Image (cartoon, rainbow, N blue to C red):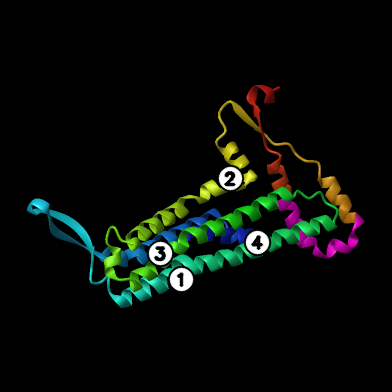
Amino acid sequence: MLTVLVSLNRYFAVCRPFSSQEFCSISSAKKHVTFIAIFSIVYNIPRFFEYKKMVICVPNNEPMEVFMISAFGDNLLYRIMYANVLYFIVMHGGPLTSLAFLNYKLIQALKKRQRRREEMGKVVNGGYQHDITLVLVVVICVFMFCQTPTFIDHILWTAVNKEQRKCGQWHYYYTAIADILAIFNSSVNFLIYIITSRKFRQLLLTSCATPGLHVVHIQPQLQGIEGNATHQNPQLLGNTHMDDIDNQANTKDENQEQTTLVPIEMAMP
């Protein structure tokens, strides 16, 4: 759900700029994360009753405590409604549909912005848009790859014979693999951003810069080019308001792309 929240914030910032100041503020982000945390706790409460502790005898008549699935957890209606239907809506189908829609609209908006800037004769840096597109596509693909086996496993727990759940049977190992993939998906997005986004790597280096490095921002001289392009193309002034927003966003992006790390001895006069 946090992945969907990140995509939703990005969608508002690019496609709904007039609403983004309120929705994408720090206070709103704290409220959204708090809501997700509370919802996650409430959603997982039934899982605490799926198993019960039992004492069994092992060789040499020694007692051992184990956890076995309870009557509540093995109830057919519970498996269908909670473990299959609700899981699909909350954990698989719902997030996947939301990610696909939001990222599709976001990629469309970025491509439209790039075409508008090209028509106005502005210098276009396509690297940033390419980074965003690549990150979003990889996030969706990894989500599908890691979460689909878990959803299938929930269906198998409803349909497959109980004997297949025991150690040594194929369903036992399939469940273990599906759980590992789900855990992997919950922690891999940070690595995806590092591998696929050059801008994210630059910002990460800036944030983690050592005391021996000094961050220098090189201001690109593009304002005159943009101003001349606007005067030379008066027919494009109909979208002045949105173009101003694009100019601010893209100027900020271009300035960040020019960030370099220079040893402090060289940066100081």
* Camera-nearest label, 1 or 3: 1
Q: Are marks 2 and 1 in contact (CB under 8 Å)?
A: no
Q: What is the quadrant of residue 241 in the picture?
A: bottom right
Looking at the image, tell me whether mark 1 or mark 3 is earlier in sequence order: 3
Looking at the image, tell me whether mark 3 or mark 2 is earlier in sequence order: 3
Q: What residue type is labelled 1?
A: Ile
Q: What is the quadrant of residue 218 in the picture?
A: top right
Q: Distance between the residues labelled 3 and 2?
A: 31 Å
* Camera-nearest label, 3 or 2: 2
Residue located 44% across and 70% down the image: 88
Residue located 70% across and 36% down the image: 217
Q: How far apart are marks 1 and 3 (CA)?
A: 14 Å
Which residues are the magenta region? 232-250
> What residue is shown with label 4?
106
| Residue 175, percent from left and from top | 36, 60
Quick one: label 1, few (<14), some, or many (20+) residues within 10 Å?
Answer: some
Looking at the image, tell me whether mark 1 or mark 4 is earlier in sequence order: 1
| Residue 15, percent from left and from top | 66, 63
Residue 39: which disc?
Answer: 3
Looking at the image, tell me whether mark 2 or mark 4 is earlier in sequence order: 4
**Mark 2: secondary structure:** helix
One can see residue 252 in this view = no
Looking at the image, tell me whether mark 2 or mark 1 is earlier in sequence order: 1
Q: What is the quadrant of residue 65 in the picture?
A: bottom left
Q: How far apart are marks 2 and 1 (CA)?
A: 30 Å
Count the numbered circles shown.
4
Q: Residue furthest right?
A: 232
> What residue is shown with label 2?
195
Q: What residue type is labelled 4?
A: Leu
Q: Which amino acid does label 2 sit on?
A: Ile
